[in-house]
Amino acid sequence: MKDVTKLFSMVIMISTSSILEVVAQSYVTYNHDAAKMNQITVQEIGAGGLTPAFYYDVFHRSYQKTAASKNKLTCRSLAGVAGWQQVEDADSVKSSLEKRAEVEALNVADRQVDIAWLAEGTKITSKLSDFQGNINHIIGAGGNFKDKERWENYYGMFQCAIKATQDAYMPNAQRKKEYLAIYADICKENETLVKFIVQLSHRTRTKALLEATGNRPNNNGAHASSAFSRWRNAGWKTQSGGGSSTGDSNTGSGTIVIDENP
């Protein structure tokens, strides 16, 4: 019986101490400060007033004038309105990006396959082959290695332009324009090269003719001397001995006369 009484007494003591501790904590936790609560209320929702008034009038007059208008509730409301307006802007941006993605997908598909080269490649390759063949004729036509090197640089330039166009990220319509421009340049330079080869050929022939004419032996002196001798033998006679008379001409010994009828 004594043990039960002791146990009951201990339980009552523990319960009493717990109740007293809760009451003490409640008093500390819920100790109300009206001035602080008013300041928090003004900062949060802008309602109420700052107390004590004389304290703010003396030390924080500028803060007291603007505290209610700068409350957090107003900032939250404005942020919410701005965020709601951004929803429509975000939807508009999303729609624009989706349309742009569809267009760009078509552009990527158009740029992956070089259809323009399939249409214009044979023509350009054939003209390049003719251009290379004409370059190989430069030495045979009388040109030098510097001339051939110059035109080979043109050939390399056209090859580089074709390779750059093939590797470029551009639609087939623009790529075809570039190929046609390259083809026109090749045709133009090829015509210029043909004229240059013709000029070299004519120069070589003219030089050969001039060299042949200059090396021809000049026998004009011998021919003139021979003709003079024949003319002198046929037209002039030298008479020696006694004098004689022939026609109107009188001759004496050692006189030269002209024979009208040889």
Image: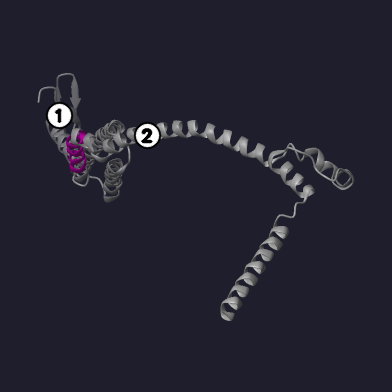
For the residues labelled 1 and 2, the Cα–Cα distance comes to: 117 Å
- Work out whether residue 126 or residue 5 is closer to the camera in this orientation and state it: 5
Q: Secondary structure at mark 1?
A: helix
Question: Which residue lies under the disc numbered 2?
Answer: 98
Question: Which residue lies under the disc numbered 1?
Answer: 235
Label total for image: 2
- Work out whether residue 131 or residue 160 is closer to the camera in this orientation and state it: 160
Q: Is residue 150 left or right of residue 12?
A: left
Position of residue 27 measured from the top left corner of the image (x, y, whole percent): 72, 58
Tell me which label, 1 or 2, sits earlier in the chain. 2
Screen quadrant of the N terminus:
bottom right
Q: Amino acid at mark 2?
A: Glu
Query: In the image as oriented, which residue stretches furthest toward the top?
Result: 248
Classed neighbour count for the residue bearing mark 2: other residues with Cα under 10 Å, few (<14), some (14–19), many (≥20): few
Q: Which residue range is magenta in the image? A: 120-133
Position of residue 54 measured from the top left corner of the image (x, y, whole percent): 89, 44
Q: Which mark is residue 107?
A: none
